Image (spheres, rainbow, N blue to C red):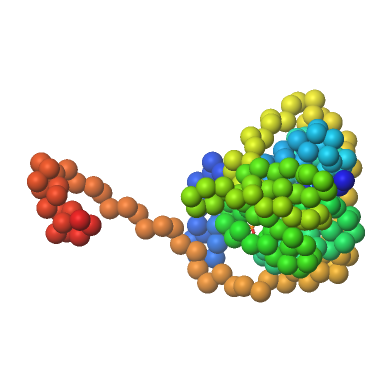
Amino acid sequence: MKVLVAIKRVVDANVKVRVKADGSGVDLANVKMSLNPFDEIAVEEAMRLKEQGVVSEVVAVSCGPAACQETLRTAMAIGADRGVLIETETALEPLAVAKLLKALMDKEAPQLVLLGKQAIDDDCNQTGQMLAALAGRPQATFASKLDIVDGKARVTREIDGGLETVQIALPAIVTTDLRLNEPRYATLPNIMKAKKKPLDTTTPAQLGVDVTPRLATLNTAEPAARAAGIKVPDVATLVAKLKNEAKVI
Ligand code: AMP
């Protein structure tokens, strides 16, 4: 069985992002970029299914500029067998990515598509759900456990107050949550091997997908700076302030 894993190149989680002076977005010049952490978990899960003998091929796909090749190589260093870059300079919205992934699903016919539950740059949490709708396939989001049993995906999800386990027919779309697994480090020999793995490039036009943005960002702003705290002399003053000024008790 073939698994398609969608991976996004995002600003590294440790970077403190700066907003551009004109408020049009976030400054990406000279910023460290990485594989979206939830997608790293998705690649790891695909590898574990391969190691269990359930999966025969893991294909990583990324949509974006040529620099996404580097992100695909990272996924291949973790273990993905090959990569597909859907190359475009256009800023992609989740619906555009979902349409591109649907077009690739039609070509590759995977039994399982794994995505992160969200990209840590736009925090949209939309692409997997949109892909499932476009493909007309079952979806299980926020997976914290994934098993393939009797040709079906059994997915445990963390919900308010407990765990929910759902079973969905394949082909299916599954999005990963933080506790699904702990991704392995790519070893140096695997990083070297990844350089030789096949990486195909296609474009939205070749896949027949229009990726023209539908949304306009009106403004991007830094969060308001926090006001400095104060010291109170005793508990009575603290309680009085919480009651009369903050009005929280
Ligand atoms: P989002 O809906 O933007 O929060 O993204 C959810 C998931 O969709 C990500 O974790 C990725 O698995 C996938 N995804 C989003 N954008 C891209 C992209 N440009 N290329 C490949 N996968 C993507």
Q: Residue at x 67, y 35 (%)?
A: 183
Horizontal relation, residue 124 to residue 194: left or right? left
Counting every numbered tag in the picture gives 0
Horizontal relation, residue 117 to residue 15: left or right? right
Residue 194 picture location, percent across and down: 82, 35
Residue 135 picture location, percent across and down: 79, 65
Horizontal relation, residue 205 to residue 159: left or right? right
Q: Residue at x 12, y 43 (%)?
A: 235
Horizontal relation, residue 185 to residue 52: left or right? left
Q: Residue at x 60, y 50 (%)?
A: 164
On-image quarter of the C terminus: bottom left
The answer to whether 65 is drawn above or below residue 189 in the figure is: below
Q: Residue at x 79, y 60 (%)?
A: 101
Residue 173 picture location, percent across and down: 74, 56
Residue 141 picture location, percent across and down: 65, 54
The quadrant where ligand 1 appears is bottom right
Q: Quadrant of residue 232?
A: top left
Q: Does any portion of residue 43 appear in the rendered image?
A: no
Q: Quadrant of residue 42?
A: top right
The answer to whether 104 is drawn above or below residue 37 in the figure is: below
Front residue of this view, candidates 129 and 62:
129
Q: Does any portion of residue 172 appear in the rendered image?
A: yes
